[in-house]
Amino acid sequence: MWNSDLFAGKVVAVSGAASGIGAAITRRFLEAGATVAAGDLQTSLFTVLQEELGPELSRRLVPLTLDVSNPHLADDFIRAVISKLSRLDVLVNNAGIAPVGSVTETTDEMWRRVMAVDVDGVFYLSRAALPHLERYAGCIVNIASVSGVGADFNYAAYNAAKGAIVNLTRSMAIDYGKAGVRTNAVAPGPVRTPLLVKNLESLSGLEAAFGKFIPLARIADPREIADAVVFLASTGASFINGAILPVDGGVTAWNGQPNGDFV
Ligand SMILES: NC(=O)c1ccc[n+]([C@@H]2O[C@H](COP(=O)([O-])OP(=O)(O)OC[C@H]3O[C@@H](n4cnc5c(N)ncnc54)[C@H](O)[C@@H]3O)[C@@H](O)[C@H]2O)c1
């Protein structure tokens, strides 16, 4: 779908790149000609990713260890990108975790871990990357969620974290726009990745319920999120800054009122 030289000569850094949406984003940027610095905590998964990508695309993949929740390791990751690849054009803040729990079910440890990965991680990587992005008129794409726009039942910490990412996106968009750096976010609805598959397997009827409540009547494929990310990072989106793009099959277009089918 993407022209194979759309990102030729460009360097894209993706966090949480070894699985799910991050792996799909990595593939799409490689297909569009970029070199991708892929960071993840679970580096063992990179072997599987490289096999799936095949030798040609893997040649432009640079897998790196990354823990976004640690400011020193986030700095080390961006430093490694610059020292190995000499530039940075796009940062995709994708790494995230989503443990289940209402407020009273959330321990201090769970709350801190979600904030550390889902919020601090975006802050640390963006802070380290921005001076380089300014040099190359680059951009940031954050992976927020529909859970940052409205709330999911029983995901208190995750909802709070993704809400923070929505407004951090706007904050960076207005602070760095003048420097030529655009910041946008994609807000996916449910996507078929290991993060969601666990819930689909443990809660029977969940997939059918998604089919009923999502106007497009299905869960997204990770590639559909990746396509929106590549678009936002491309010159086709050159005047888009501070947007929170729902890629949710219409979930957030619905105000929650039942229609005749539910009576
Ligand atoms: N799957 C969905 O339905 C859905 C919906 C909306 C938003 N999202 C968001 O999309 C992003 C990716 O989710 P996914 O569904 O692909 O999940 P996933 O669990 O398949 O992949 C997440 C990746 O992030 C990595 N990761 C976790 N903690 C990390 C850390 N501290 N440092 C570096 N890497 C780390 C994991 O190792 C994993 O490879 C997340 O931000 C998630 O909140 C997912």
Image (spheres, grey):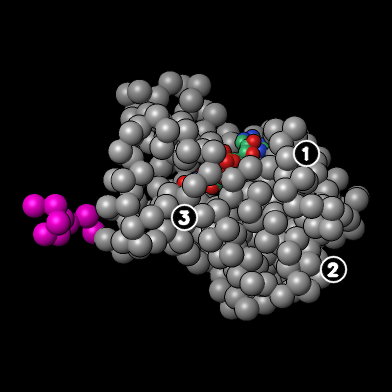
User: Chief secondary structure of the magenta span?
Assistant: loop
From the image, which quarter does the N terminus lie in? Answer: bottom right
Marks 2 and 3: which is nearer the front? 3
Is label 3 within 8 A of ligand 1 (CB to nearest ligand atom)? yes
Residue occupying image coordinates x 66% and y 49% = 23
Specify the quadrant of the image occupied by residue 89. bottom right
Nearer-the-camera pick, 48 or 104 = 48
How many tags in the picture?
A: 3
First along the sequence among labels 3 and 1: 1
For mark 1, give the secondary structure. helix
Amino acid type at image mark 2: Gly
Q: CA distance from mark 3 to mark 1?
A: 25 Å
Amino acid type at image mark 3: Ala
Q: CA distance from mark 1 to mark 2?
A: 24 Å
Specify the quadrant of the image occupied by residue 87. bottom right
Residue 99 placement, left or right of 211: right
Q: Where does the image place residue 39, in percent across and percent down from the top left?
A: 73, 43
Q: Which region shows up in magenta?
A: 255-263
Q: How would you rate the neighbour count of disc 2 (Cα within 10 Å): few for under 14, some for 14-19, many for 20 or more?
A: few
The residue that label 3 is drawn on is: 220
The residue that label 1 is drawn on is: 47
For mark 3, give the secondary structure. loop
Q: How would you rate the neighbour count of disc 3 (Cα within 10 Å): few for under 14, some for 14-19, many for 20 or more?
A: some
Marks 1 and 2: which is nearer the front? 1
In the rendered image, residue 258 lying in the magenta stretch gets the answer yes
- Per the rendering, the mark at residue 9 is 2
